[in-house]
Image (spheres, helix red, strand yellow):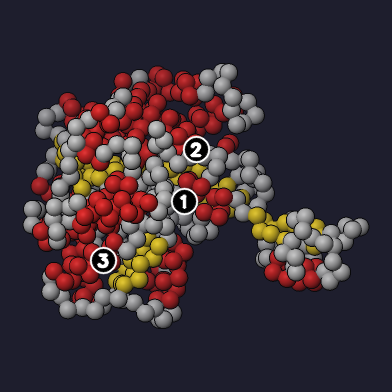
Amino acid sequence: MRKFDTKVQHLKYKVLREVARRAWAGTLQKDVLDIPKAIVPGKQPTVRCCVYKERAILSERVKLAMGGDEQNPNVIEVIDIACDECPAAGYEVTGSCRGCLAHRCEDVCKRGAISFDHNHVAYIDKSKCVECGQCAKVCPYYAIINRKRPCQEACKVKAISITEDNAAAIDNEKCVQCGACVYQCPFGAISDKSYILQAIDLIKRSEKNANYRVYALVAPSISSQFTYAKLGQVVTGIMELGFGAVVEAALGADMVAQTEARELAEKGFLTSSCCPAFVQYIESAFPDLLPLVSHNLSPMAALAQYVKTIDKTAKVVFIGPCTAKKAEAQLETVRPYVDCVLTFEELQALFDSRDIDITTLEETMLENASYFGRIFARTGGLSDAVAQSLKEQQIDFPLKAVSCDGIEACRVALLKKNKGVLDANFIEGMACVGGCIGGAGCLTHGEKNQAQVDVYGREAQAQTIGEALSQL
């Protein structure tokens, strides 16, 4: 049974599983150095030059599985030793160069970076090239291409550069911690920090204290994951791990839709605050638009706040597809409510670290949220929910929403708003293509995930947002 899209994800999962397994047993500190050897035995073939380098890289992965560099505020980190197999990025001349007489590439280059060999074939001097791309634009044969590394291509906010040592480097001022580079790196040289040990510690402490309860807030995008089992079995599996209760984060989405509709009608224009990577992008690239960001907490934080209001002893673990949620949980406005964030990748590692086969379990159904709260998981769902909430609350406001599918679409909408030419009064920003179902922490990615979210939404017992919130 295939649980992950790529072998890189599977390797990351194996490290998480082994770290978690030893954490449950209380032997992690004693056995931590043995984990790389357990994953890569001495005679096992590796993709690296030797088994010793593979184990050295695994040691760095273990550190990330245990929380990573505490001095680095970013939840995304580069494993330098693993980042050495990609070709140098930048413009280069391909075999399509015909050695023409026009030499337009040479004429347009203001840095004198282009010369020719005895066959008139162009050559680019990297010490002079500034990667402006003008030579590629004028070449009649399209013989000059811009070769980008997968991580740079994935990062749409241009937060990744290449160091003199040929390794990737992340600019924390630009990075929105969406994790796109994590998913796209074919060598797994970029990864998100894991807080799986915090979650295990919370559960173990609750098992010793009957007055201490750990809640799992599960993102609605879970409906598109764990496709080898039934959703109700996944929920039961979470309970088997030791969580005291499982609650739909989609109920928090219902809460946000209701308050955001009122805020939008009051202010006349709003950008959503549900996606932390989108909000962080506004902070770094469009700070003048910050006053337009909704003052609502995200569904995760709003529901966690409610849980801790009704249960003073509660500890809250959010489980979802998003690496940026790990950063959001560290914000001063969110930290009091969310104690830990896990991804679906990490949840799978937790199941297997305790040998829980969820396919054998009975089903436990989630019945907290409405259809509209559940479809927050995909692009357009938030806008649909706000429209529904305006209708239910009988607020006469002509909603004109633009749903941004991915950070590039977000950039276009924000640029238009900055220039006063955006024909909309509400921006729904989703940093990941497809919305939350495209998050870096998903087990699987793909268009079919949206259909599964919609099916899950239609199964909701509450037909309206108000009906869902009436149970609070």
**Dot placed on the residue nearer the N-terminal end, 3 or 1:** 1
- The residues tagged by marks 1 and 2 sit, at their Cα atoms, a distance apart of 14 Å
Does 344 sit above or below residue 291?
above
Where in the figure is residue 424, as x and y percent of width and height? 34, 77
Q: Going by the picture, which residue comes out furthest to the right?
A: 118
Kind of element beneath mark 3: helix
Kind of element beneath mark 1: helix
| Between 288 and 194, the one nearer to me in the picture | 194
Discs 1/2, front: 2
| Residue type (three-letter) at the residue carrying disc 3 | Asp
| Between 91 and 78, the one nearer to me in the picture | 91
| Residue type (three-letter) at the residue carrying disc 1 | Ala
- The residue wearing badge 3 is 384
| Between 120 and 62, the one nearer to me in the picture | 120
Where in the figure is residue 381, as x and y percent of width and height? 29, 61
Query: Can residue 243 be seen at all in this image of the molecule?
Result: no
- The residue wearing badge 2 is 8
